[in-house]
């Protein structure tokens, strides 16, 4: 295939094998992934917590250090996109479907089903529900994305390296980045990306199915999800083939508008004052307990440890497995930003938007559960949002809007995924050809379907945790490499130049 490198053929062969196993022996794939996932979370849970928190530390260091003045590009480069469009694109790629899927479900689950500390249905459970939701979707997630994206953008635009994960490791690996070691790293990144994006597509298909089932009684099964994925595949393929500046840019802005509209409607018709109070209180608790939550592993409490494995470790693995995809995409649209501006926006702006989102949807869900209006905790995960919206005026219309938002997030995630995978498997070509993007679109669809077929949401989670583990070591190497090269380049640039004082001021 034109432009395709050996990374494409090897990655595709491994993925075809996985798909074949899932079709021929779905039970075996589910059992195998479940065993490996349990082994990893039980044995290496501590490692995930330390690694992701270390990524946060690196980002904060780059934010406040003199290195922050360096640009992701040449010093005279200007950004390609306005700040609102840039923020919309990185936000849509970075959270997408997950934000809608978990918006009401995660807080209500922490409150009424499985509390972080084991006490459900209380005021303490309500506070902890939002505090830990903020923790899972806040700075830690965006530090993983930001570190990978920053490394890629710097080597792409400042040093002229191809858009490959291996290219960012030249200061650490030297000439080995061009050989088998570099290709292996790129293959690991491709596999993590495919599994991470396919997992999100699976979540999206399940929730669209859940909404249609709740509203119109459509069967909730693999056949319906198969049809949904096929329909959306046609949509995202059309978008992907239209290019970055048309499809993804336009859809990202539409996403933000629809998400904002849905959020405003839920806030206006929901428990508005309770939401505002809960947001304020939860933000304070999140900041106050940031360090404690970052290293919480519960070694003496098996029940709490099981909760951490199922939620926190799952999320850290999700962010890591998504990071090559989101990182390359964010890097591609971040040329011309200073490191300080990049870190400030990527860490803080999406986190704050996410906190507002979860406060509105999670706060409304908890309020409904507390006053007995709707027992949302008794619904399956994919129907929680629609059960909540059913209590609102024009609930059906709002639910249809929510399904539309999920579908567009679905398209955006898959669209961005095919674009990034095309870059990763053509030696870093920033404009991969349409045939390659279409091939990856089909592969993403096949993987999502196989994972759903072999074990539903649990199989999706298992594969993501497994794929994230090897790539976490790559991110550590990327952090070391980036700091090493930034210190070198900063030294060559010399101290930051400041304007000399005016004569009148100097005489005073």
Image: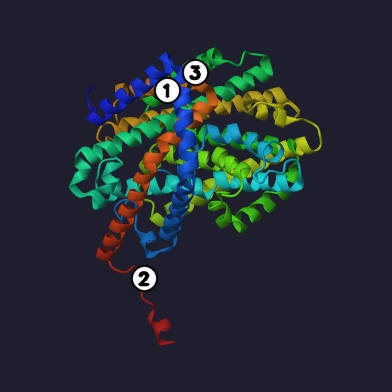
Residue for badge 2:
498
- Where residue 447 is drawn, which disc sits there? 1
Does residue 298 appear in this view?
yes
- Where residue 6 is drawn, which disc sits there? none
Tag in front: 3 or 2: 3
Quarter of the image containing the C terminus?
bottom left
Q: Which badge, 3 or 1, comes first in the chain's sequence? A: 1
Quarter of the image containing the N terminus?
top left
Q: CA distance from mark 2 to mark 1?
A: 54 Å
Residue 459 in the image: state x and y as whole percent.
Answer: 50, 26
Which residue lies at the image location 76% right of the left edge and 28% below the top edge?
393
* Observer-nearest of 18 and 320: 18
Residue 23 in the image: state x and y as whole percent.
Answer: 42, 15
Judged left or right of residue 283, residue 188 is left
In this rendering, the answer to whether 235 lies above or below 337 is: above
Does residue 346 appear in this view?
no
Which residue lies at the image location 67% right of the left edge and 14% below the top edge?
217
**How many numbered marks have been drawn onto this rendered protein structure?**
3
Judged left or right of residue 270, residue 105 is left
Which residue lies at the image location 24% right of the left edge and 64% below the top edge?
492
Q: CA distance from mark 3 to mark 1?
A: 10 Å
Q: Which badge, 3 or 2, comes first in the chain's sequence? A: 3
Q: CA distance from mark 3 to mark 2?
A: 61 Å
* Observer-nearest of 292 and 41: 41
Instruction: Name the image quarter holding residue 499.
Output: bottom left
Residue 136 in the image: state x and y as whole percent.
Answer: 56, 44
Q: Secondary structure at mark 3?
A: helix
* Observer-nearest of 41 and 497: 41
Q: Which badge, 2 or 1, comes first in the chain's sequence? A: 1
Q: Secondary structure at mark 2?
A: loop
Residue for badge 3:
453
């Amino acid at each position: 295939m034109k432009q395709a490198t050996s990374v494409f053929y090897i990655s595709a062969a491994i993925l075809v094998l996985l798909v074949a196993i899932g079709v021929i022996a779905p039970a075996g794939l589910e059992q195998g992934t479940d065993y490996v996932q349990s082994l990893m979370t039980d044995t290496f849970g501590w490692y995930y917590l330390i690694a992701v928190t270390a990524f946060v530390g690196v980002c904060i260091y780059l934010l406040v250090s003199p290195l922050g003045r360096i640009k992701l590009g040449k010093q005279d480069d200007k950004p390609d996109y306005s700040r609102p469009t840039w923020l919309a694109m990185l936000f849509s790629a970075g959270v997408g479907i997950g934000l809608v899927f978990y918006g009401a479900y995660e807080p209500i689950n922490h409150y009424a089903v499985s509390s972080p500390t084991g006490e459900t249905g209380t005021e303490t459970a309500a506070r902890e529900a939002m505090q830990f939701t903020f923790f899972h979707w806040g700075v830690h997630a965006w530090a993983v994305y930001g570190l990978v994206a920053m490394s890629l953008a710097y080597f792409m635009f400042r040093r002229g390296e191809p858009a490959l994960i291996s290219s960012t490791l030249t200061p650490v690996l030297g000439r080995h980045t061009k050989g088998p070691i570099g290709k292996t790293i790129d293959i690991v990144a491709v596999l993590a990306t495919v599994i991470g994006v396919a997992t999100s597509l699976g979540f999206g298909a399940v929730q669209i199915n859940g909404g249609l089932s709740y509203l119109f009684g459509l069967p909730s099964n693999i056949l319906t999800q198969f049809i949904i994925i096929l329909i959306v595949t046609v949509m995202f393929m059309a978008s992907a083939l239209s290019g970055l500046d048309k499809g993804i840019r336009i859809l990202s802005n539409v996403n933000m508008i629809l998400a904002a509209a849905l959020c405003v409607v839920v806030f206006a018709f929901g428990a508005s004052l309770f939401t505002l109070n809960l947001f304020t209180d939860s933000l304070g608790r999140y900041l106050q307990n940031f360090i404690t939550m970052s290293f919480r592993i519960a070694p003496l409490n098996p029940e709490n440890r099981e909760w951490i494995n199922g939620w926190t470790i799952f999320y850290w693995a999700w962010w890591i497995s998504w990071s090559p995809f989101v990182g390359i995409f964010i890097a591609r649209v971040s040329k011309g930003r200073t490191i300080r501006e990049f870190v400030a926006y990527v860490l803080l702006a999406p986190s704050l938007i996410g906190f507002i989102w979860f406060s509105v949807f999670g706060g409304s869900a908890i309020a409904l559960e507390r006053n007995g209006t709707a027992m949302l905790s008794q619904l399956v995960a994919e129907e929680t949002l629609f059960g909540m919206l059913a209590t609102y005026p024009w609930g059906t219309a709002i639910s249809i809007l929510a399904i539309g938002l999920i579908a567009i997030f679905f398209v955006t995630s898959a669209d961005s995924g095919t674009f990034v995978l095309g870059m990763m498997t053509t030696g870093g070509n920033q404009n991969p050809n349409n045939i390659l993007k279409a091939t990856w679109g089909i592969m993403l669809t096949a993987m999502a379907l196989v994972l759903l077929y072999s074990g539903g949401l649990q199989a999706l989670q298992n594969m993501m945790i497994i794929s994230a583990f090897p790539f976490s070591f790559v991110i550590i190497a990327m952090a070391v490499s980036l700091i090493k090269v930034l210190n070198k380049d900063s030294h060559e640039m010399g101290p930051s130049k400041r304007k000399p004082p005016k004569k009148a001021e100097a005489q005073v």
